[in-house]
Amino acid sequence: MSLSDEEKSQLKQMARDTIEGVLFGKKDISYTIPETLKVKAGAFVTLKKKGELRGCIGYIRGILPLYETVEEVALQAAFHDPRFDSVDMGEWNKIDLEISVLTPMKKIKDIEEIEVGVHGLFIEKGLHSGLLLPQVATENKWDKITFLEYTCYKAGLPKDAWRSEDADIYIFSAEVF
């Protein structure tokens, strides 16, 4: 999925308006939704304060239309990320918002298919799973193995669990804005 600058801007505004609706009691705003934003797609909303993570929640698969996914995960990132307290009115103007729209997951057999800086990773092993967005590896200057290890940590697994026969590794790309 390739979004126009206008569609990206609209999604960011919808995410902001949704969070501000909770923070400041703003009324619902009516939008004209282009067909592109009605396609079911996975997406994450990441909040950062002074460059530091402040919340990040998303859906890895397209279960809702993209615009609804963005509104819902924006609320989750701002108010329900278990790693952080809820965003409050006093800090809202210091928070930057980033949206990552995901491509469908592709299961891989060979880690040589992973391109750091292009792909995000999703690892499943038993009841454990973990996901890291493509930009996480780039921001931390990780190589492929380190990226795999940190995705295992995110899943609550030992760092080398990705090597296991019963571990499934998926790659995906993201349009980040």
Image (tube, rainbow, N blue to C red):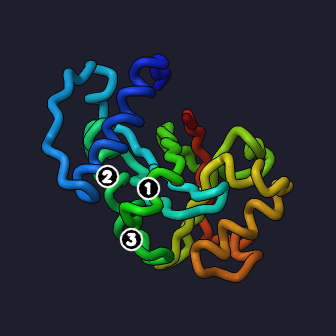
Mark closer to the chain start, 3 or 2: 2
Assign a secondary structure to mark 2. Answer: helix
Residue 11 percent across, percent down from the top left: 37, 33
172 or 13, which is in the foreground?
13
17 or 105, which is in the foreground?
17
Q: Nearer the viewer, mark 1 or mark 3?
A: 1
Residue annotated with mark 3: 86
**Amino acid beneath label 3:** Ser
Label 1: how many residues lie within 10 Å, few (<14), some (14-19) or many (20+)? some
Split into 4 quadrants, where in the image is the C terminus? top right
Q: Is residue 156 above or below residue 21?
A: below
Q: Is residue 54 left or right of residue 70?
A: right
Q: Quadrant of residue 64?
A: top left
Mark closer to the chain start, 1 or 3: 3
Residue 74 percent across, percent down from the top left: 37, 52
Residue annotated with mark 2: 19
At horizontal 46% and vertical 25% (from top left) the residue drawn is 1
**Amino acid beneath label 2:** Ile
Residue annotated with mark 1: 92
**Amino acid beneath label 1:** Trp
Assign a secondary structure to mark 3. Answer: loop
